Image: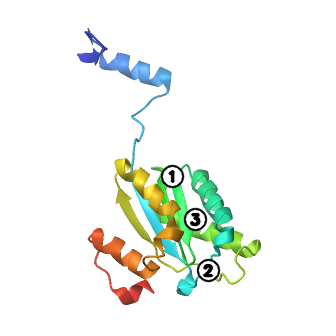
Amino acid sequence: MVKSCGMGSIATHIYSQAHWARLLLFTGVSSMAAYTQILYHIVWSTKDLKGVLSLDRQGDLQRFIMGKTHDKDCNAIAVGGYLEHIHVLTTVHPDISLHDLVDYLKQTTENWIIENQLFPDFNGWQDGYGAFTCSWQKRGPLSHYIENQEYQHHCLTYQEEIEEMLTKSGINFTAACLT
């Protein structure tokens, strides 16, 4: 017996397993889809933390990253950065791993920057990245933080920012490994 709940009443339907199998076969549904809402705040930096991402061209880079994120069926909510690093606030589609998404974003942006000579002194991204989950309810303030990186970095360096993010997230790290 399967109960289906309507707005104001409960209807009870009795179906045999064979009926459900025929119904699923007819509709093409074989199982429940994957529903996720995992929001990641991803951060990565330039090789050797060189401040080569000039602010006058960052908008182009941010739009490119936004597009590449959508190419992987992920929903980029905010992209920002400063002279030596990038922030991306995004959901990640269940068919792609976080590592594969970050690797794809770093590879495609690196190639695009070099091919288009967007930042002449750019020589690549550092190998690692930081990724932090955050609640959907905090996406507004976090988006504001990411989109206003120039202001944020009047107060603290990238090194201080990433150390604070790691500490607040309870991640053990060695400061020497962040440079």
Of the residues shown, which amino acid type is indicated by label 2?
Gly
Q: Is residue 84 above or below residue 42?
A: below
Residue furthest right as drawn? 116
Pick the quarter of the image with the N terminus.
top left
- Which comes before the other along the chain, label 2 or label 1? 1
Q: Position of residue 65 (x, y in %)?
A: 61, 61
Q: Secondary structure at mark 1?
A: strand
- Mark 3–mark 2 CB contact (< 8 Å): no
Residue of label 3: 105
Q: Residues within 10 Å of mark 3 (few under 14, many from 20)?
A: some
Residue at (35% x, 56% y) in the render: 134
Q: Is residue 21 left or right of residue 146?
A: left
Which color scheme did the rendering employ for the protein?
rainbow
Residue 77: mark in rendering = 1
In this view, 14 is above or below 119: above
The residue that disc 2 covers is 124
Q: What amino acid type should be assigned to the residue bearing mark 1? A: Ile
Secondary-structure class at tag 3: helix
**Residue 126 at x, y = what percent?**
53, 80
Q: Nearer the viewer, residue 6 or 79?
A: 79
- Cβ atoms under marks 3 and 1 closer than 8 Å: no
Q: Earlier in the sequence, mark 3 or mark 2?
A: 3
> How far from the left and from the top, in percent, is residue 54?
65, 75
The disc placed on residue 66 is none
Q: Nearer the viewer, residue 159 or 71?
A: 159
Residue most toward the left?
Answer: 1
Query: Label 3 is placed on what type of residue?
Result: Leu
Q: Nearer the viewer, mark 2 or mark 1?
A: 1
Question: Could you say where residue 56 lies in the image, as x and y percent from the top left?
Answer: 68, 70
Looking at the image, can residue 151 be seen? Answer: yes
Q: Residue at x 57, y 85 (%)?
A: 50
Please tell me which of labels 3 and 1 falls first in the chain.
1
